[in-house]
Image (spheres, rainbow, N blue to C red):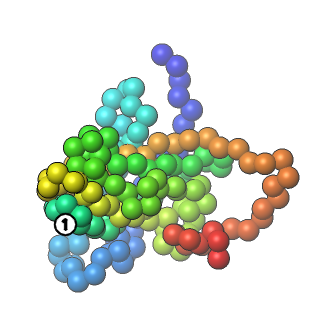
């Protein structure tokens, strides 16, 4: 068995940051979601993907979309990225889609004002009339760490502060 290179660490964001991802939920409900957050994990030794677990029950009829504040952040070493995809089985059975097709979590996102809180926006794209039900604590998305390179003439020095679209501002 080969030894894997260890390049990241999952953490839970602060309660205040988690709470900021919701509209119109009571503190009692949000605290129950927050206390149930599970760190992403691989299911087997041969799994490439770290399963992200739903922090609350999700029901999506065909065509419906929901934003999921995962409560998770990730420290990643430089030259690596975390790529997010739907869990394979959910994609196969329900055509579960991430609305941005593939989520990209850069290493510097960890240092953003929002604590690098990872959100997912998912859609049940079923064309077979299947309603998708994901229970709290069930895996719905997976993340894979990938090494990347840059061009020889790259000399970017700017830093990020924020989430979606913040690297082009």
Disc 1 packing (10 Å; few <14; some 14–19; many ≥20): few
Q: Residue 122's x, y, as percent? A: 32, 61
Q: Quadrant of the C terminus?
A: bottom right
- Which residue sits at x=60%, y=46%? 80
Which element type, helix, strand or loop, lies under badge 1?
A: helix
- Which residue sits at x=43%, y=46%? 143
Residue placed under numbered mark 1 in the picture: 32
- Which residue sits at x=31%, y=34%? 43
Q: Looking at the image, which residue sits at the far right? A: 153
For the image, the number of numbered tags is 1
One can see residue 45 in this view: yes
One can see residue 35 in this view: no
Q: Looking at the image, which residue sits at the far top? A: 1
- Which residue sits at x=35%, y=74%? 21
Q: Looking at the image, which residue sits at the far bottom? A: 24
User: In the displayed structure, does residue 117 sit left or right of residue 37?
Assistant: right
**Front-most of 167 and 64?**
64
Q: Quadrant of residue 166?
A: bottom right
Q: Residue 107's x, y, as percent? A: 59, 55
Q: Residue 162's x, y, as percent? A: 55, 72
User: In the displayed structure, does residue 149 sit left or right of residue 84?
Assistant: right
User: In the displayed structure, does residue 58 sit left or right of residue 76?
Assistant: left
Q: Residue 56's x, y, as percent? A: 20, 62
């Amino acid at each position: 068995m080969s030894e894997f290179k260890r390049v990241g660490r999952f953490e839970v964001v602060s309660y205040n940051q988690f709470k900021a991802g919701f509209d119109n939920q009571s503190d009692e409900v949000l605290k129950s979601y927050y206390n149930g957050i599970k760190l992403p994990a691989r299911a087997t030794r041969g799994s490439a993907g770290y399963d992200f677990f739903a922090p609350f029950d999700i029901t999506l009829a065909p065509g419906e979309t929901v934003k999921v504040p995962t409560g998770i952040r990730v420290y990643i070493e430089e030259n690596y990225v975390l790529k997010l995809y739907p869990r394979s089985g959910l994609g196969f059975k329900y055509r579960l889609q991430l609305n941005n097709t593939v989520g990209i979590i850069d290493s510097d996102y960890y240092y953003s004002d929002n604590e690098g809180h990872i959100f997912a926006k998912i859609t049940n794209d079923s064309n077979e009339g299947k309603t998708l039900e994901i229970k709290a604590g069930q895996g719905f998305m997976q993340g894979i760490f990938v090494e990347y390179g840059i061009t020889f003439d790259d000399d970017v020095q700017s830093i990020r502060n924020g989430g979606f679209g913040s690297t082009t501002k």
